[in-house]
Amino acid sequence: MAKLKKADLELLAHSDGGRINMVDRDKIKDPTSRQRLEENGLIDPKGYLTDEGKKMLDSVNAQAEQLLVGIPFVLGVHDKKVSEELFEIAWDERKVNDHQIITDGGALFLGKREGRMSQKVTFPEVYIEKLFHKYIDGAAGLHIVYPHTLQIAALHGVTVVWLTDDKQKRPVVIQLKYLAYALHKFKNVAFLASDEKATPIRVFSKGSKGIAKSIVGLIMPVDVSKTMLRGIKARKDFGAVNGL
């Protein structure tokens, strides 16, 4: 049997009337998903869910509902696998102020593109320079934040992580794929936030030869006003905030 991918489960979750959608391109992210679902006995040749497919759908929906509410972020578990999305989107690679950086417009990291980051894009130089001067060279008044809650913006939507300070009073949201990549690429990572709204999270790597003050990246926060995200509050049942 072929190993299932995230796109396969999303196609299964979009099933209607016990049958997967085989014509809507917005819902078919991977043309080979149908083949894998059928090979795993989850659908029949006509696209109807089998008994096993219905059980899998119930499981997927149950997990998704939990994520809509939010579950405790567990360091070393939820960030363990770097999202394949990072290797499917286009990255700009260049030197700025004698530092090699990569950016996709949603995050910026010190270093070179990895081999699987095959797609390229070029952002205006003024955009990159602005990020450096304002958020790296001018980094000040920051406080440390820790991964707290894992959540999805909407059913089958973007997976995000709420970061907050040790008192759980100043939450900020970033996409999980960027957090996982930062933890994968750098050692002794910490995340620094500003009280100023809509400013990037600084990725700090203790002891590294960072861009400025050991800063090795920037991650743009998610604008929660434009999503279906449910807010979080300080929660005793989540225990202490994860330290890094």
Image (cartoon, rainbow, N blue to C red):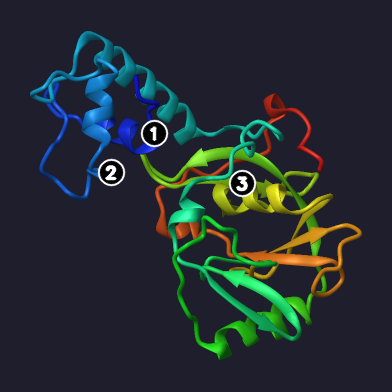
In the rendered structure, which disc, 3 or 1, sits on the residue that comes first in sequence?
A: 1
Residue at image mark 2: 30
Residue 77 to residue 49: above or below: below
Element on which disc 1 rests = loop
The structure residue drawn at horizontal position 11% and vertical position 24%, both measured from the top left corner, is 17
In the rendered structure, which disc, 2 or 1, sits on the residue that comes first in sequence?
A: 1
Query: Residue 89: image x %, image y %?
Result: 44, 60
Query: Residue 27: image x %, image y %?
Result: 22, 44
State yes or no: discs 3 and 2 in contact (Cβ < 8 Å). Answer: no
The structure residue drawn at horizontal position 44% and vertical position 65%, both measured from the top left corner, is 119
State yes or no: discs 2 and 1 in contact (Cβ < 8 Å). Answer: yes
Q: Determine crowd level at label 3: few under 14, some 14-19, many 20+ residues with C-alpha closer than 10 A.
A: many
In the rendered structure, which disc, 3 or 2, sits on the residue that comes first in sequence?
A: 2
Separation of residues labelled 2 and 1 (CA atoms)? 9 Å
Q: Determine crowd level at label 2: few under 14, some 14-19, many 20+ residues with C-alpha closer than 10 A.
A: some
Q: Residue furthest top?
A: 51
Residue at image mark 3: 162
In which quadrant is the C terminus drawn?
top right
Residue 14 visible in the shown view: no
Residue at image mark 1: 5
Element on which disc 2 rests = loop
How many dots with numbers? Answer: 3
Q: Amino acid at mark 2?
A: Asp
Seen in the image, is 163 located left or right of residue 243?
A: left
Q: Nearer the viewer, mark 3 or mark 1?
A: 1
Between 43 and 166, the one lying in front of the other is 43
Q: Quadrant of residue 193?
A: bottom right
Seen in the image, is 191 located left or right of residue 123?
A: right
Separation of residues labelled 3 and 1 (CA atoms)? 25 Å
